[in-house]
Amino acid sequence: MIEIKNLNKSFVKNGKKIEVLKDIDLEIRRGESLSIVGVSGAGKSTLVHIIGTLDHPTSGEVLFDGRNVYQWSEAELADFRNRKIGFVFQFHHLLPEFSSLENTMMPALISGASKKDAREKAEIVLNEVGLGDRMPHKPGELSGGEQQRVAVARALMMEPEVLLADEPTGNLDTETGSKVEDILLDLNRRKRITLIVVTHNNKLAKRMSRSIGLQDGKVVE
């Protein structure tokens, strides 16, 4: 499903070239769950951002179903992200002035769906993640775990083929984090959503079907 070929990412800081990712080759199969582990600064988040087309590689290719997405225009990439990829980050990035339901509706509204259709779909998804009774509540009225579940619901709104999660339990206590892990892995198994998770949590990494490491910008299987 996803094929990464000879991927490199570097930037220049204070006149010095810093190589973040070096000659990455990686295949990710449809429906698998993959954890990416490594120390801080190893390039894990950068790799996920490039897979999700939030950042561009310096060189190399990222192919989805055989198509190199970095040959597309920015408008095409934005449409691809909206339709095919869901994102869950360590910080949930919910809009504080909107309710759980409204936050969840956002991707569908951005895609041009009617408010009625977006609301109906958001209600279904929020019920799936166990927040059917919290729809009217704004983020400030929710626990950390509930906020992260809203973020998961928002990521699922467009029925993505790929779900990218960057430290999704990093700000949660152990019990709450385990509940979020359960939701993500259940979605992977039940809906065959390809799940890619960046984590420092070894327990979560071991629950995935495959785990890779990043060290000095290179993949370590």
Image (tube, rainbow, N blue to C red):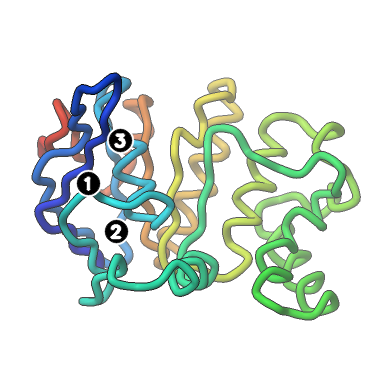
The mark closer to the camera, 3 or 2, is 3
Question: Residue 212 location in percent, x, y?
Answer: 19, 39
Looking at marks 3 and 2 on the same chain, the residue that comes earlier in the sequence is marked by: 2
Looking at marks 1 and 2 on the same chain, the residue that comes earlier in the sequence is marked by: 2
Q: Is residue 191 above or below residue 50?
A: below
Most foreground residue, 33 or 105: 105
State which quadrant residue 11 falls in.
Answer: top left
Can residue 198 be seen by looking at this rendering?
A: yes
On the picture, is 122 further left or further right than 189? right
Q: What separation in Å lies between label 3 and label 1 (alpha carbons)?
A: 15 Å
Question: Residue 143 location in percent, x, y?
Answer: 75, 30
Residue at horizontal 65 percent and vertical 74 percent from the top: 111
Under mark 1, the amino acid is Arg
Crowd class of label 2 (few under 14; some 14 to 19; many from 20; radius 10 Å): some
Question: Residue 8 location in percent, x, y?
Answer: 17, 45
The mark closer to the camera, 3 or 1, is 3
State which quadrant residue 163 falls in.
Answer: bottom left
On the picture, is 73 further left or further right than 118? left
Q: Secondary structure at mark 2?
A: loop
On the picture, is 41 further left or further right than 143? left
**Quarter of the C terminus within the rendering:** top left
Q: Secondary structure at mark 1?
A: strand
Q: Which residue, given by chain and number where applicable, does mark 3 sit on? A: 44
Q: Which residue, given by chain and number where applicable, does mark 1 sit on? A: 210
Q: What separation in Å lies between label 1 and label 2 (alpha carbons)?
A: 8 Å
Q: Which residue, given by chain and number where applicable, does mark 2 sit on? A: 32
